[in-house]
Image (cartoon, coloured by chain):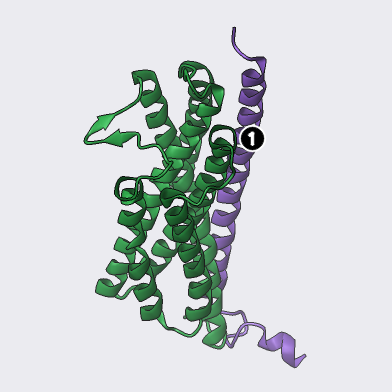
Chain colours: A green, B purple
Amino acid sequence: MKRRWPEVLWGLSGPIGVIFWWMAFFYAPREREMGDVQRIFYMHMPMAWTSLLAYGVSAILHGLYLWKRQVRWLFYGWSCVWVGVVTNALVLVTGMCWARPIWGSWWPWEPRLTTTFLMFIMYAAYLVLFAVLLPEGRMLGIVAYNLFSVVNLPIVYLAPRLWRGLHPVVIEAGQVRLEPAMVHTVLVGWLWSLLLALLLGFVADRVQWARFRLAQWLWSGGTSDA
Amino acid sequence: MRDPRVFYLFLAGLGFWLGLWLALGWLLWQTRRWTHRLETLLTSPPPDGGRHGETTKRS
């Protein structure tokens, strides 16, 4: 059973995904004003939370690298950013699909959308930077950029509260503006998106680690103690 | 009366999820298999006692 839990999580994620999909379409009631288009929200919001969480955790893991100086932490941090970028892209796409029928525009440049897009670009740039700086051994450059990018997180969260835009605010002053069935669907959706993010992270980490081990072996001249 | 398109979208979403889930399972299985193989290859001593592939290069 050693290190079998990614496979266990994969097994759990299958039925949870099916339950979530059923809840999003049949358990959650039809929203009065927006109609069925609002159901996109059940994927949009959990993915947004997951991407913010992944970016936040990546900053902690980069901090751990600074403390422990073990490259493993840097790779875990990289996997978190990778997962964050994938879920962030899904947030942008689902948001656009909702915006077109509701706002009449695929992309109005309002505060929440603009800051989320900037965050996506900055973390996508991190992935490029990582690929360039890692072979040169410039780990501190990677860590510095990651810790700089985490400034985006509070800005994205506070954007609709600071600069009143079009984006709806679901949670305000501790109050959730949703019916209980909608809240249940969002929570199951979040659980599903977290599992999906973890699985994507495991795959990304294994690939990155294998690439690193192979590069390390080649640089050492192909000796078995690499 | 529920819009029938909701049901079709549900089916499409379910199909998408099952496909993604199977793909993830396959990727997990393959990455586990290949990382294990790579570790075995990199940590095992080469049969000629020298560097990996040297015998092949010389011959």
Any part of residue A3 in sight: no
Residue at the extreme right: B59
Q: Residue at x 54, y 46 (%)?
A: A90
Chain letter behind tag 1? B
The residue tagged with tag 1: helix, strand or loop?
Answer: helix
Dividing the image into 4 quarters, which one contains the N terminus of chain A? top left
Residue A106 horizontal side relative to residue A189, left or right: right
For this view, does A12 lie left or right of residue A62?
Answer: right
What percent of the width, then of the height, locates residue A37? 55, 27
Question: Is residue A30 visible from the viewing direction of this image?
Answer: yes
Relative vertical location of residue B58 with respect to residue A97 in this rendering, above or below? below
- Say few, some or many: other residues with alpha carbon within 10 Å of mark 1 (under 14 / 14 to 19 / 20 or more): few
Horizontal relation, residue A51 to residue B7: left or right: left
- Picture coordinates of residue A96, whole percent (x, y): 56, 43
Q: Please, is residue A19 above or below residue A71 in the view?
A: above
Q: Position of residue B46 (x, y in %)?
A: 59, 80
Q: Amino acid at mark 1?
A: Phe
List the residue tagged with mark 1. B16
